[in-house]
Amino acid sequence: MTTSQASYGSNVLEDLHLRHVEKDVLIPKIMREKARERCSDQVQDFTKCCKDSGFLMVVKCRKENSALKECLTAHYQNPDFYEECKMEYLKEREEFRRTGIRSKNRLQKLPTSM
């Protein structure tokens, strides 16, 4: 193995290594965002119930709350979903390291008139 191959191999391993904050904060954040999108029907039902019920939402919206929690928990506990979110994070991190531009900034449109 040449020196360049060895350094390439260590870069690949380094790129796949996750820090504590990435595992416990950043990837779960992506998971929450994606799970809310995938459970959007339950989120809408619960939100509507809460708006319609006012202070009685604790009692009146138990069914909607349970359905929402069940949907979200199913995603949070799914190892395939975690891997999907982890790969999305690693792709964003790699792009940031390459360009120095965060994905949210990259996705924003530049002003057309100056």
Image (spheres, rainbow, N blue to C red):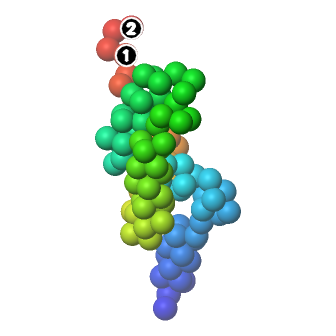
In space, the residues marked 2 and 1 are separated at their CA atoms by 7 Å
Q: What percent of the width, then of the height, locates residue 61? A: 46, 37
Res. 106 visible in picture: no
Identity, as a three-letter code, of the amino acid under mark 1: Pro
Q: How crowded is mark 2: few (under 14 residues within 10 Å), some or many (20 or more)?
A: few
Vertical side of 66 occupied by 60: above or below: above
Q: Which of marks 2 and 1 is in front?
A: 1
Seen as rendered, the residue at the extreme right is: 20
On residue 92, the disc is none
Vertical side of 15 occupied by 108: above or below: above
Which residue does the image show at 44% across and 70% down from the upper left? Answer: 79
Q: What percent of the width, then of the height, locates residue 57? A: 52, 30
Q: In which quarter of the image is the C terminus?
A: top left
Which residue does the image show at 68% across and 62% down from the upper left? Answer: 20
Which residue does the image show at 36% across and 42% down from the upper left? Answer: 42
Q: From the viewer's side, name the closer residue of 15 and 74.
A: 74
Q: From the viewer's side, name the closer residue of 36 and 42.
A: 42
Vertical side of 106 occupied by 5: above or below: below
Res. 61 visible in picture: yes
Which residue does the image show at 48% across and 82% down from the upper left? Answer: 5
Query: Mark 1: which secondary structure?
Result: loop
Identity, as a three-letter code, of the amino acid under mark 2: Met
On residue 111, the disc is 1
Please report contact status of discs 2 and 1: CB closer than 8 Å, yes or no.
yes
Query: Mark 2: which secondary structure?
Result: loop
Q: Is residue 18 left or right of residue 65?
A: right
Number of numbered markers: 2
Q: From the viewer's side, name the closer residue of 25 and 63.
A: 63
On residue 114, the disc is 2
Q: What percent of the width, then of the height, locates residue 106? A: 41, 36
Q: How crowded is mark 1: few (under 14 residues within 10 Å), some or many (20 or more)?
A: few
